[in-house]
Image (cartoon, rainbow, N blue to C red):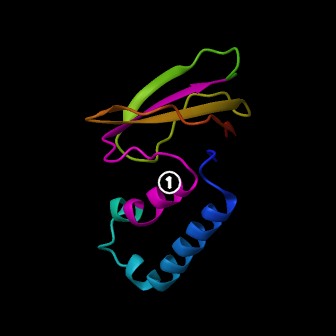
Amino acid sequence: MPNDTTFESFEKELNRLVESFGKRLAELKQPGYAEAQLRDDFLNPFFRALGWDPMPNAASFEVQTTPDPVTGTWTNHPSVTKSKTSVSSFTSGAKVYSRVRAVNPAGTGAWSSEVAKIAP
């Protein structure tokens, strides 16, 4: 967390979000409650509480993978418009690192931290 975000301020905001989620659970389960609204109501405030700056109105996401984030070359994959995607063609059992960044009309966000997964 950045210097201006303390554990106490994060904990307070997290508790507020959890309480709000619990109170609104019936509403949140309704078919009309969209993913974009969930992002505005809960995810972006959660990221801000961590001191992260979410990319509002992301139009697409760029995805990269590598077998080694330190010395390996990052491979670009097709941009996606959903916040979930699959990347294939890896050797089963191989460790693969992925990172993503958001793109909107104002520009391109920073790369996320890499995440390691084992290819199925």
- Left or right? Give the position of 60 relative to 46: left
32 or 54, nearer to the observer? 54
- At x 46% / y 47%, what residue is drawn? 84
62 or 57, nearer to the observer? 57
Which residues, given as a range, are shown in magenta? 39-67
Q: Find residue 29 and report its horizontal and vertical position in percent.
A: 41, 78
Q: In the displayed image of the protein, which residue is found farthest to the front?
A: 4
Amino acid under disc 1 = Arg
Identify whether 73 is placed above or below 19: above
- At x 74% / y 34%, what residue is drawn? 93
Q: Which quadrant is the C terminus positioned in?
A: top right
Q: Find residue 110 and report its horizontal and vertical position in percent.
A: 48, 32
82 or 12, nearer to the observer? 12
Disc 1, SS: helix
Q: Find residue 31 and report its horizontal and vertical position in percent.
A: 33, 74
Number of numbered labels in the structure image: 1
Residue 46 is covered by the magenta coloring:
yes
Q: In the displayed image of the protein, which residue is found farthest to the left?
A: 105
21 or 97, nearer to the observer? 21
Report crowding for label 1: few under 14, some 14 to 19, many 20 or more residues within 10 A (C-alpha): some
Q: Name the residue under label 1.
A: 48
Residue 90 is covered by the magenta coloring:
no
Q: Find residue 50 and report its horizontal and vertical position in percent.
A: 58, 53
